[in-house]
Amino acid sequence: MAGDRLHFYLIRLKKASPLELIHRIREACFVRILKLALSRGLFRIQAPNVELEEIRRIKLTEPVGDISEELVESLLKGHRFCLNQDSLSIERFERDWSRSFFKDVPLDSEEPDLRAVWEPARLQHLALLLHYLKKNPKSAQRKRINIFVKENLLNWIGANPFLKGPHYISVMECALRIPVFLLSISILDNLSTVDRRKILQVLFEHAYITHKRLSRYSSLGNHTVTEGMGLLVAGSVFQKSGKGKKWLRNGIKILNEQCFQQVLNDGGPVEESLSYHRFVLDLFWFAVDFMENNDLSDSASLKTRLEQGEEFLSAFSDEDNSFPDIGDNDNGHALAPGISPRRRLGPKPTPKGKGLVFKSFPSTGCTVIRGDNSFRMTFDHGPLGKAPLFNHGHADALSITLSICGRPFFTDQGTFRYNGKKKERAYFKSTRAHNTVTIDGRDQARQLSGFVWDGAYEVDLTECGSRDSVFVIQATHNGYSNGADPVHHIRTLGFYDTGIYIVKDTFTGAGKHRFELNFHLHPEVVVSEEGDWTVLQNLGVKIFVKLFENDFQILKGCEEPFLGWFSPEYGLMRETSVLQTYRDGHARDVCFTTAICLNRPENPSVLRDMAAGL
């Protein structure tokens, strides 16, 4: 365990710039001094007093989304968001480490997963009740909600003294709690002066440690955006004090800078994760709404960029606004599950009449193809993620996903967990867990830890346009170019208006290798055979698949190699089917040609001619 942590820090050291090294050294010294001062009772920060009238003048965001009476009742009866892990084990872990300095809490606990420990401590179950109360001030549940939220909030503060326990490890988690503290002071009408002072004090402490330990340099990402949002809110509360002014100024600065780094020029995510993109966009929308409501900053340029981000996500989304699970997904929410800040959603690119619509995003490196019957295919021809660590990216170069009529067929397998399950974590990030080709059983890049990658590949989109009656997209990557016998993978997609789609994989390079093609199916997909065709059905929707050079074998729930597993949500894993084939040989001699048809063709030889023309 200690060796793993040392290995992780060596990796970070290797990838750090000189400026980052100075930053890390300063932070390490600050934390050591903090621990020493805290142990000797010498550290104490005092929040300046803020009158209740001043706090209530702060205009809060009005979230979008329904908070049902059933959900309210469930929350009042003790329901918590635990990311599908046992709440008792989470509570036990919290108790065991509640008096330890945060840096002494183990990061790699097998049970429970630390990410699941953090989830209920985001206090978003209380945020839901507070927003419900704000929207329904005359609710018959008002008194009960007031009492419940006050007791739970003050109990949490008492059980988690400043800088003690697991909930101060990540300052992102501290930042996410800051709006909840403000909400509670603004909305609860049963708080005494002493109660408000306690909440103000912990809000001040959260902002203090967030500002002192901001995620910078190689850690820039969704954490930094969250921290900027937290400083914005805390700074607005304490804006008459020196620290509050600094927090407000830096929070706005961080948000303005990061909006144009985290959202690329085509609207896509720099972290190459659609789920984190939704999370980050919602954080920005919340911040924009907060700044405008309280006349804190002009956010016109941010809104323009965010609208690009929404247009990007809309291109991937089905009618219910769900999208493929590309990249990491930890089921995080900016406000709380089921509610969000007001967004300006972008239009979906939908076909007019018959035909296909193609939307390519060159900065992010992906193309979405839509057609009749709500056909949607995505093609990943982008980078691994945000350099230098590529934290939330998966090794999925040239992978595709496919859904029809809102029914998923070829899927990204999800995330499962971040901590405590090394084999599973490595699998769900791996090339083998995606709908592309794995060579010699290796990933397209090298996994150095549960998050950090090395040897990131480059992808080149070589063609994207029409050839007579077919639309062709072609890309190549060099993820297998290291070593004595380098290989390049080339994938060509051909789209025909007749509902026929060809996926052709070819290779260049030296040496003899094993080439393994996988197509991962959603667990609801039923596989059968009709003559030479593999038939896939999902709730009445049927497609036909044929591999010309070989036959597919169907694998499910394998342990060695680990294959055939699907994660529908964070913390959950279930068996699913995989269509797999492999060939051993020289790169120039190996080819996989897969036909995907919405209707079974009468003459398969026509498909061969189509493939030969690609």
Image: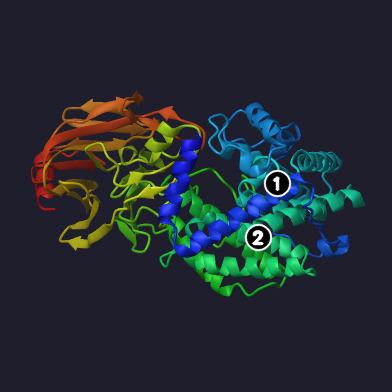
Residue 564: x, y in percent?
35, 30
Which residue is depicted at the point 73% across and 39% down?
A: 72
Q: CA distance from mark 1 to mark 2?
A: 14 Å
Q: Nearer the viewer, residue 346 or 539?
A: 346
Q: Is residue 559 left or right of residue 230?
A: left
Q: Amino acid at mark 2?
A: His
Which residue is depicted at the point 69% across and 51% down?
A: 34
Q: Amino acid at mark 1?
A: Leu
| Color encoding of the figure | rainbow
Which residue is depicted at the point 55% across and 34% down?
A: 113
Q: How many marks?
A: 2
Q: Considering the numbered disc 1 on the image, is that residue within a helix, a strand or a loop? A: loop
Circle 2 sits on which residue?
Answer: 211
Disc 2 residue crowd, few under 14, some 14–19, many 20+, Cα 10 Å: many
Q: Is residue 247 above or below residue 519?
A: below
Residue 299: x, y in percent?
60, 72
Q: Is residue 610 left or right of residue 491?
A: left
Circle 1 sits on which residue?
Answer: 163
Q: Is residue 598 above or below residue 231?
A: above
Residue 383: x, y in percent?
34, 56
Q: Considering the numbered disc 2 on the image, is that residue within a helix, a strand or a loop? A: helix
Instruction: Tell me, yes or no, if residue 276 can be seen here.
Output: yes
Residue 563: x, y in percent?
33, 30
Question: Looking at the image, is mark 1 or mark 2 earlier in the sequence?
Answer: 1
Q: Quadrant of residue 451?
A: top left
- Dot 1 and dot 2 residues touching (CB under 8 Å): no
- Numbered badge on residue 312: none
